[in-house]
Image: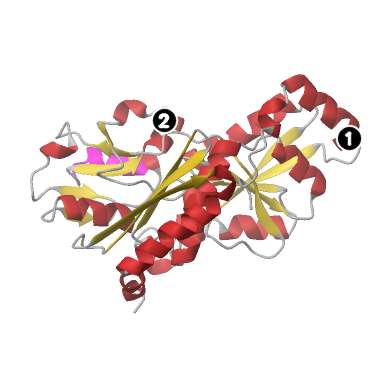
Amino acid sequence: MLGQQNDGRHQALNKATISNFFDYWVFPLAKKLIRIATRQSPLALWQAGHVARRLQTLFPDVTTELVEMVTQGDKILDAPLAKIGGKGLFVKELEQGLLAAKADIAVHSMKDVPVEFPEGLHLAAILPREDPRDAFVSNRYAYFADLPTNVKIGTSSLRRQCQIKHALPGAEIIPLRGNVNTRLAKLDDGAYDAIILAAAGLKRLGLAGRITAYLTPEISLPAIGQGAIGIECRVDDVSTNTLLSALHDDETGICVAAERAMNARLQGGCQVPVAGFAQLTAGQVHLRGLVGTPDGSLILRSAGSGPASGSAAVGKRVADDLLGQGADRILSALFA
């Protein structure tokens, strides 16, 4: 599994070594043009452009082209994601483009990527993680702790909802969909007292100044894969996979592998009240996991550690502990 082998190869290769390796061994077979499937939202375009720039910096002979696509998740904005199929709706059309050879790679926010991949596709690389925390954004209150009991908070994430309701049982959670700028505009129009967004997206779009405060993992444990960018590719496209291997960040890959292994064991999907956040310290991966009821009345927590080489095993152990506490009953009730 991606991220399981932390042999330091990527860190050991300096730019000149990488360039020489690809000049002599890869480029005779490689595509000179890499077509990048992406959604059309400003954040998705930023992420795809970032991947394009990284590729062109490492491999000047490679050119890139963005293939913009509209997904079902972008079209349906009047219903919670949990009721229309989850965040997998943001990747399906991009994957179909890969399978139809309309694009060579697809760039995703890892928190949107389902556990299972269609046959013939896989996760080829994960880039270094941006700030994984949730951001508290408000024009009325300076801190989350300042919020009154009857506050109106905008989010369509069941993960965020369950943790907010646990901390503030009287809070009114109002659905909030659309791209980052759309969500901020709704806040500015006065529809909400505050909204919760991913800090990574705001920072990538140059909107860090809109962050009122950062929510600690103790208040809002991040989503699985939050802050990380993943690159999907066809399994049999050897030359493109080889290029992408130079972009992969081992530390982020190890942490995300632990988080996704936990989610896979829970069979949680992308749009359920499940949170998971792993960190790597001195060769040890430390994972915190959470499952809660949407109304926040019950929050189950677990944590586990283990060697980086066994990050998936850490994720499975944390999931098993949550299941032993009753997580399966919480999750199955969502789909009853």
Q: What stretch is highlighted in magenta?
A: 181-190
Of helix, strand and loop, which one carries label 1? helix
Percent of width and height locating residue 38: 59, 46
Identify whether 326 is placed above or below 121: below
Number of other residues with Cα within 10 Å of mark 2, as a class: few under 14, some 14 to 19, many 20 or more: some
Percent of width and height locating residue 233: 69, 51
Report, in whole angstroms, how far the alpha carbon at label 1 lies from the one at label 2. 37 Å
Residue sitting nearer the eye, 301 or 294: 301
Residue furthest top as drawn? 16
Q: Is residue 137 magenta?
A: no
Of helix, strand and loop, which one carries label 2? helix
For residue 116, which quarter of the picture?
A: bottom right
Percent of width and height locating residue 278: 44, 44
Between discs 1 and 2, the one toward the N terminus: 1
213 left or right, relative to 84: left
Q: Which mark is residue 203?
A: 2
Which residue is located at x 28 percent, y 38 percent? 216
Name the dominant secondary structure of the magenta segment: helix
Mark 1: amino acid: Trp
Quadrant where the C terminus is found in the figure: bottom left
Which residue is located at x 38 percent, y 62 percent? 321
Mark 2: amino acid: Lys
Marks 1,2: beta carbons within 8 A: no
Identify whether 1 is placed above or below 66: below
Residue furthest bottom as drawn? 336
Q: Which mark is residue 51?
A: none
Identify whether 294 is placed above or below 132: below
Q: Is residue 183 magenta?
A: yes
Q: Mark 1 points at which residue?
A: 25
Please name which of the two marks, 1 or 2, marks the residue nearer to the observer. 1
Which residue is located at x 26 percent, y 38 percent? 136
